[in-house]
């Protein structure tokens, strides 16, 4: 199902994340005080708004209450980040995610209500986009320009079926490399094992084929 996502702050990380989410079919609103950044990204997202994210009234006017996810990407501006996270939570946004540039900032943003903190040193915009927009993707790794490895939970329709019945390779061009139960260790694939809700699959798939099963 398509999600409505707001990206607040258009540094390199915010721009990368916003464009990747939009390319994946999500509704993406971006906001930043930099008019040039807004003009440049406007054709690449659903909506782009020039706004002072240090200003409570301008943040409130963005309509964050209509968003499924708000991602605050101003790791270098702690006051704007705090204001944005707090207002998003007050507006009832289900998931508020914030970028932090230090452990202290991470602790502060968690206290004001951020549901998840993104560490830009560990997660790039593309990897975050894959994880954030799917209830099934547990982790995502790029292998090269066309291949990626995805750690995923079985879809509801897969529960109770084995890999032979599902025939994921034929349906989705997806190869299952390993399988485990959450908290356990990865092991070789037994194609006769019935999948359950606590299974995780390590799969290899073409990047262009990811949306086929989402």
Image: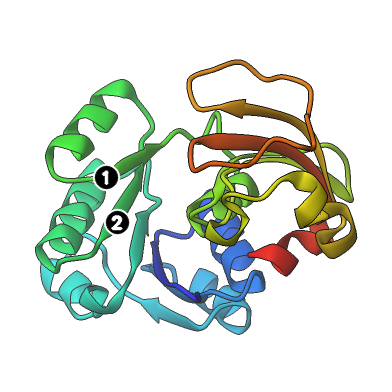
The residue labelled by disc 2 is 95
Circles 2, 1 touching at the beta carbon (< 8 Å): yes
Q: On screen, 83 above or below 138?
A: below
Query: N-terminal of the two: label 2 or label 1?
Result: 2
| Relative to 125, 208 lies left or right | right
11 and 24: which is toward the camera: 24
The residue drawn where x is 26% and y is 31% is 105
The residue drawn where x is 49% and y is 36% is 198
70 and 77: which is toward the camera: 70
Can residue 12 be seen in the rendering of this structure? Answer: no
Q: On screen, 97 above or below 3?
A: above
The residue drawn where x is 68% and y is 30% is 179
191 and 31: which is toward the camera: 191
Q: Residues within 10 Å of mark 1 (few under 14, many from 20)?
A: some
Residue 162 in percent (x, y) is at 71, 45
Residue furthest top as drawn: 185
Residue 101 in percent (x, y) is at 38, 32
Q: On screen, 45 above or below 211?
A: below
Secondary structure at badge 1 equals loop
Secondary structure at badge 2 equals strand
Q: On screen, 73 above or below 2?
A: above
The residue drawn where x is 69% and y is 35% is 193
Task: Classify residue 32 by image quadrant.
Answer: bottom left
Residue 14 in percent (x, y) is at 50, 56
42 and 35: which is toward the camera: 42
Residue 54 in percent (x, y) is at 20, 59
Quadrant of the image containing the C terminus: bottom right
Query: Marks 2/1: CA distance?
Result: 6 Å
| Relative to 114, 168 lies left or right | right
The residue labelled by disc 1 is 115
């Amino acid at each position: 199902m398509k999600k409505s996502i707001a990206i607040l702050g258009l540094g390199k990380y915010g721009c990368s994340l916003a464009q990747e989410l939009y390319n994946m079919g999500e509704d993406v609103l971006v906001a930043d005080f930099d008019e040039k950044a807004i003009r440049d990204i406007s054709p690449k997202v659903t909506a782009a708004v020039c706004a002072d994210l240090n200003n409570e009234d301008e943040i409130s006017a963005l309509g964050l209450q209509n968003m499924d996810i708000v991602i605050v990407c101003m790791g270098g501006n702690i006051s704007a980040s705090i204001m944005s996270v707090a207002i998003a939570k007050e507006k009832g946004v289900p998931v508020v995610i914030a970028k932090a540039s230090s452990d202290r900032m991470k602790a502060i943003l968690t206290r004001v209500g951020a549901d998840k903190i993104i560490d830009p040193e560990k997660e790039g915009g593309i990897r975050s986009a894959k994880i954030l927009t799917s209830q099934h993707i547990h982790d995502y790794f790029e292998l090269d320009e066309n291949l990626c490895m995805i750690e995923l939970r079985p879809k509801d329709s897969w529960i109770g079926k084995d890999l032979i019945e599902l025939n994921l390779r034929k349906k989705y061009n997806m190869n299952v490399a390993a399988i485990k139960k959450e908290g356990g260790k990865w092991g070789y694939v037994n194609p006769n094992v019935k999948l359950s809700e606590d299974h995780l699959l390590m799969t290899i798939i073409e990047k262009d084929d990811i949306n086929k099963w989402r």
